[in-house]
Amino acid sequence: MTETLQVRRGTEADKATVISLIDEAAAWLDSLGIDQWARPWPTRAKRDERVVNGLRSGDTWMVQDSGLVIGTITYRSSGNEDLWTSVDRAEPAVYISRLMVTRSYAGLGIGSSLIDWAGKRAARAWDAQWIRVDVWTTNEALHNYYEKRGFDHVRICGYDRETYPSSALFQKPITEIDGAAEARFTSAYGVS
């Protein structure tokens, strides 16, 4: 792995790569007995549509090591109205999703650094005060992952696997970001 990774905006051409990362993560989670992404939610077509929407809107970023895509993150300034209250959404925040790093690069802190990278960008772009994420409700290991990275559990919204399986809400103040994390990434192809 190179010391500095490249980050670029995703394009529709990255759809298959993002879906491949999801499928790889789903297989790994299944091997651990975790039901997250055991089947595309709510359907493969709807999941794929969300992936494409993130790519089209410019909210999805691809992480590369020497040209090889090794991870992705999607972030935006607005939160799901069914999960985050109007009081929550009145505070400027960055909402992250589809944070994945290929298993061969797991354990190197790339995911954690990407979270803080997105937070720093959002703080500059729209004065975000929080990094927020909705997490698969039954994946307690993932809850623990976020808590170990400075996130506080906010609440679990009404949980219904068929309606919305990611209703465990976590947030972290921008002031708790690791300032060095952003330095792990450079802009690939001159895109910022």
Image (cartoon, rainbow, N blue to C red):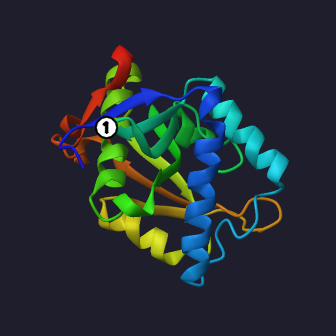
Q: Is residue 37 left or right of residue 130?
A: right
User: Given the current orientation, which residue lies at the most extreme top position?
Assistant: 190
Tell me the quarter of the image containing the C terminus. Answer: top left
Rendered view: 47 above or below 156:
above
User: Given the current orientation, which residue lies at the most extreme bottom position?
Assistant: 33
The image quadrant that residue 119 belongs to is top left
The image quadrant that residue 16 belongs to is top right
User: Which one is nearer the viewer's eye here, 103 or 174?
Assistant: 103
Q: Residue at x 18, y 35 (%)?
A: 183
Can residue 109 be seen? yes
Q: Residue at x 75, y 48 (%)?
A: 47
Q: Is residue 127 left or right of residue 180?
A: right
Q: Secondary structure at mark 1?
A: loop
**What crowding class fits label 1: few (fewer than 14 Cα within 10 Å), some (14-19), or many (20 or more)?**
few
Rendered view: 41 above or below 187:
below
Residue 121 x %, y %: 34, 28
Can residue 136 be seen? no
**Which residue bears the numbered disc 1?**
66
Residue 146 x %, y %: 39, 62
Rendered view: 97 above or below 124:
below
What's the amino acid at mark 1? Ser
User: Which one is nearer the viewer's eye here, 100 or 128?
Assistant: 100
Residue 184 x %, y %: 22, 40
Q: Residue at x 70, y 34 (%)?
A: 52
Q: Residue at x 66, y 76 (%)?
A: 35
User: Which one is nearer the viewer's eye here, 53 or 27?
Assistant: 27
Q: Is residue 12 left or right of residue 111?
A: right
The image quadrant that residue 160 belongs to is bottom right
Q: How many marks?
A: 1
